[in-house]
Image: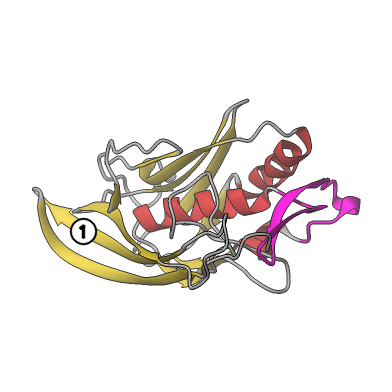
Amino acid sequence: MIRIGRNLLTAIALCHFFFGPAFADDRPPEVILGSCATALAPDDNRTKNIDLAMKRLNGQMVEPGKVFSFNGVVGRRTAGRGFLPAPVLFQNRRNILIGGGVCQVSSTLYNAALLADLEIVERYRHSSPITYLPLGLDATVSYGYRDLKFRNTHPFPILITASLTEEMMTISVLGTGKLPYDVELVTEVSEIEAPFQDQGSESGKEVQRYRLKTSDGIVIEKEYLGRDYYHPVRAGE
């Protein structure tokens, strides 16, 4: 079981949230409701693509009741828009495609949105496990095909901020008021034995995802977020 919440650190990702005093409705969002940081791979083209997507996300405001679309904001990932060829996971294989790395941005945003207790409207897993977040907490995107969408269910507008260093990227969701509870993400991973005995074959994984709301250490709501299933992989596939 993996739990992600206040001050909980995994080897590959830090997702956290903070609470602060509520502000009047005419004040800009300044309270961090949910935040996630993931480590960058040492690939210049990939980092360039991430930087382009982060710049389009940074400063985006979502009003109460409105739905945010990652593809709608970031747009097409094309060479004409400055995106470069970089490694991606595509149909269970690693390839070099224009815009490689953008899925790390959508996955990081997905975790920040979950921790900010936003309603996830649309989300898809990668075809195989990724390395920068725990199983079950990624969100792949492909323009015109797969999107990440969430709804602002809070009574105040939210602001998305995105920043990049040489080693880390951080995305946060800010609001004008604090939440009356804490939020944690929990995943439960089960091993699926491979039905073939080829040397080098990999077992499959089944991941159950939950979002917990707690107050004074007591769970007041456990929300089931869904199930991800990764098929066993035969050696050489």
Q: Which residue is drawn at 82% across and 53% down?
A: 98
Q: In this view, does 46 lie to the left or right of 235?
A: right
Residue at image mark 1: 213
Instruction: Tell me: 172 left or right of 191.
Output: right
Q: Which of 26 and 171 is in front in this view?
A: 171
- Does residue 19 sit above or below 207 in this rendering? above
49 within the magenta span: no
Looking at the image, which residue is at 49% across and 49% down? 159
Q: How is the protein colored in the picture?
A: secondary structure
Numbered-mark total? 1
Image spot of residue 2 (x, y percent): 30, 50
**Could you tell me the amino acid type at mark 1?**
Lys
Q: Work out which quarter of the rendered image holds the C terminus and state it.
A: bottom right
Q: What stretch is highlighted in magenta?
A: 76-100
Q: Quadrant of residue 36?
A: top left
| Percent x, y of residue 93 | 70, 59
Q: Which residue lies furthest to the top in this view?
A: 166
Q: In this view, does 237 lie above or below 167?
A: below
Q: Can residue 174 be seen in this snapshot?
A: yes
Q: Quadrant of the N terminus?
A: bottom left
Instruction: Indicate whether residue 79 is drawn in magenta.
Output: yes
Which structural element holds mark 1? strand
Query: Which residue shows up at 60% across the image and 44% down it?
Result: 58
Task: Locate residue 85 relative to residue 126 in the image: left or right.
Answer: right
Please state which of residues 209 and 128 is positioned toward the viewer in this rendering.
128
- Residue 110 x/y as whole percent: 48, 56
Query: Which image quadrant for residue 189?
Result: bottom left
Tell me if mark 1 has few (under 14), some (14-19) or many (20+) residues whose alpha carbon lies within 10 angstroms of its own.
many
Image position, residue 188 (x, y; %):
30, 60
